[in-house]
């Protein structure tokens, strides 16, 4: 039961029964006494005049002279609010925006704030039920469908199954509509078997002149719950075991949801071992979106399917891409290669910087102007001048991700580097080196481990990556390793 519905029911019980104890209210509503206490506090904060009398014969009651916010609601308004709560968008989809607006207008606080100095809950909480990155789904004419279902008759629906183009007719006995995740579904029996139909794929429907035939004891709520359980917890599931980069665990929990059956320590450092359940082995396709952060361990047929799918993806993307711009073509080329030089990047002034034009190895460094390590610019410039004629390029990448220590504009960064440290080596555009918005250049660089075998995020400003003239990452040095350290000089000499 939702909070809005429970509050309305609590008010109705208090109005009908008069004084009641908290345990009695809890039993009546099917909730815990603690929940009743919380709900009473919410009603009190909203201005509902409640009287609490302690003692053996005490309890909670409504003040007879006080306004009862729900008493002014019509039967239709109460029925709508039980279904949609305070979600006007859902009421609008049902063709009842005016009714919902009128009902909400009657739910204003009935009296003065009873807790001076405390902000109303509506001032500090907002609820948005839409999924992230969602677009308005095509749900069809839900209002018209709801109106026809309320006649209590059987329906003939023309329905298109997911992934198919053709539609077919079927006679169904409708229980009603289920709203979930921003979408609407028709819940109905077909030949006595429960079914769930996405309203957005209903081509049309018509009402038969005969009453619906529902299974005894079943309701819209019970059938909806049964269908949800069969989808989320199917019988005879396939358990897929995989090794996952620990940094992707939060993302996996959001994407996999209840399919994520178990999480254990992984077989290698920095990983977790996950068990994911699917109704069929083909469900393992879902794990492809984790890219090289996941390694499917078993069962063998799941691992084989991942291999086959991956080969198919590679084969398709190795084909010439027609109609792509030069920048897109270079990005596509990088997807099929680990050559760092193929990754598109821009110079600090916004012009295109083609790393393939650089003559030899590169030392790529994420730099900042207001960091305790900023004096490393001096050693970097010295290194660049010493090895420039032999083909080495030092490439600085300004980054503001670490405590905002590179806040300047491109012009300000260029002026600072030139005037303060006499920097002559090239600088890239200002970019991110970690996280979801990391530039592809650093997304690739950070897959390389350092001398201790640790890959992953850049630790701080002035981390260094040595790249060969063929685009292979040869070595990684953490920020504390200064540019003229023996290990860097040795690695540069070897690369040259």
Image: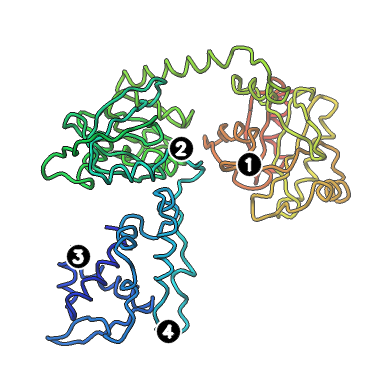
Q: Nearer the viewer, residue 272 or 78?
A: 78
Please give left or right for residue 292 compared with residue 47 in the image: right
Q: Residue 469: where, in percent of width, then height?
A: 72, 22
Residue drawn at the location 59% of the way across and 35% of the way down: 446
Q: Nearer the viewer, residue 122 or 304?
A: 122
Q: Secondary structure at mark 4?
A: loop
Q: Earlier in the sequence, mark 2 or mark 3?
A: 3
Q: Residue 144: where, in percent of width, then height?
A: 38, 43
Q: Nearer the viewer, mark 2 or mark 1?
A: 2
Q: Which mark is residue 433?
A: 1
How far apart marks 4 and 2 lie (CA) works out to 44 Å
How far apart marks 2 and 1 lie (CA) works out to 38 Å
Residue position for label 4: 112
Please give left or right for residue 481 compared with residue 393 in the image: left
Crowd around label 1: few <14 · some 14–19 · many ≥20 (10 Å) = many
Q: Nearer the viewer, mark 4 or mark 2?
A: 2
Q: Secondary structure at mark 3?
A: helix
Q: Earlier in the sequence, mark 4 or mark 3?
A: 3
Residue position for label 3: 29
Crowd around label 3: few <14 · some 14–19 · many ≥20 (10 Å) = some
Residue position for label 2: 138
Instruction: Answer with the quarter of the image where residue 299 lies.
Output: top left
Q: Nearer the viewer, residue 261 or 135?
A: 135
Compared to 481, does 19 lie above or below?
A: below
How far apart marks 2 and 3 lie (CA) works out to 36 Å
Q: Residue 475: where, in percent of width, then height?
A: 63, 31
């Amino acid at each position: 039961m939702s909070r809005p519905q429970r509050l309305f029911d609590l008010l109705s019980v208090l109005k009908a029964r008069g004084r009641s104890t908290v345990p009695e209210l809890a039993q009546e509503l099917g909730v815990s006494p603690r929940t009743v206490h919380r709900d009473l506090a919410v009603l009190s904060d909203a201005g509902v005049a409640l009287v609490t009398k302690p003692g053996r014969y005490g309890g909670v009651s409504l003040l007879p002279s006080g306004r009862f916010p729900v008493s002014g609601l019509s039967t239709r308004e109460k029925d709508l609010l039980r279904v949609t709560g305070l979600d006007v968008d859902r009421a609008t989809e049902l063709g009842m925006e005016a009714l919902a607006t009128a009902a909400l207008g009657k739910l204003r606080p009935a009296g003065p704030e009873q807790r001076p100095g405390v902000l109303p809950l509506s001032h500090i909480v907002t609820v948005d039920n839409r999924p992230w990155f969602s677009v308005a789904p095509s749900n069809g004419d839900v209002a018209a469908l709801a109106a026809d279902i309320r006649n209590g008759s059987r329906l003939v629906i023309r329905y298109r199954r997911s992934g198919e183009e053709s539609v077919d007719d079927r006679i169904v006995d409708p229980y009603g509509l289920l709203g979930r995740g921003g979408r609407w579904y028709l819940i109905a029996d077909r030949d006595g078997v429960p079914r769930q139909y996405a309203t957005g794929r209903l081509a049309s429907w018509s009402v038969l002149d005969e009453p619906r035939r529902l299974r005894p004891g079943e309701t819209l709520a019970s059938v909806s719950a049964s269908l949800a359980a069969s989808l989320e917890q199917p019988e005879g599931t396939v358990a897929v075991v995989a090794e996952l980069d620990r940094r992707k665990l939060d993302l996996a929990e959001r994407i996999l949801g209840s399919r994520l059956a178990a999480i254990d320590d992984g077989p290698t450092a920095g990983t977790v071992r996950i068990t994911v359940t699917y109704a069929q082995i083909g469900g393992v396709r879902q794990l492809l979106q984790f890219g090289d952060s996941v390694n499917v361990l078993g069962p063998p047929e799941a691992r084989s399917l991942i291999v086959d799918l991956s080969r198919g993806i590679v084969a398709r993307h190795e084909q010439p891409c027609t109609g792509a711009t030069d920048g897109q073509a270079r990005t596509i080329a990088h997807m099929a290669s680990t050559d760092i030089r193929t990754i598109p990047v821009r110079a600090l002034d916004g012009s295109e910087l083609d790393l393939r034009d650089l003559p030899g190895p590169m030392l790529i460094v994420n730099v900042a102007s207001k960091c305790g390590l900023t004096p490393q610019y001096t050693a970097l410039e010295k290194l660049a001048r010493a090895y420039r004629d032999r083909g080495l390029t030092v490439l600085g990448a300004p980054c503001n991700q670490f405590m905002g220590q590179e806040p300047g504009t491109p012009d300000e960064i260029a002026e600072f580097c030139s005037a303060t440290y006499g920097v002559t080596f090239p600088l890239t555009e200002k970019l991110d080196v970690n996280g979801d918005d990391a530039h592809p250049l650093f997304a690739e660089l950070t897959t390389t481990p350092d001398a201790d075998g640790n890959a992953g995020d850049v630790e701080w400003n002035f981390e260094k990556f040595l790249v060969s003239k063929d685009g292979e990452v040869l070595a990684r040095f953490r920020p504390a390793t200064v540019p003229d350290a023996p290990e860097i000089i040795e690695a540069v000499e070897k690369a040259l």
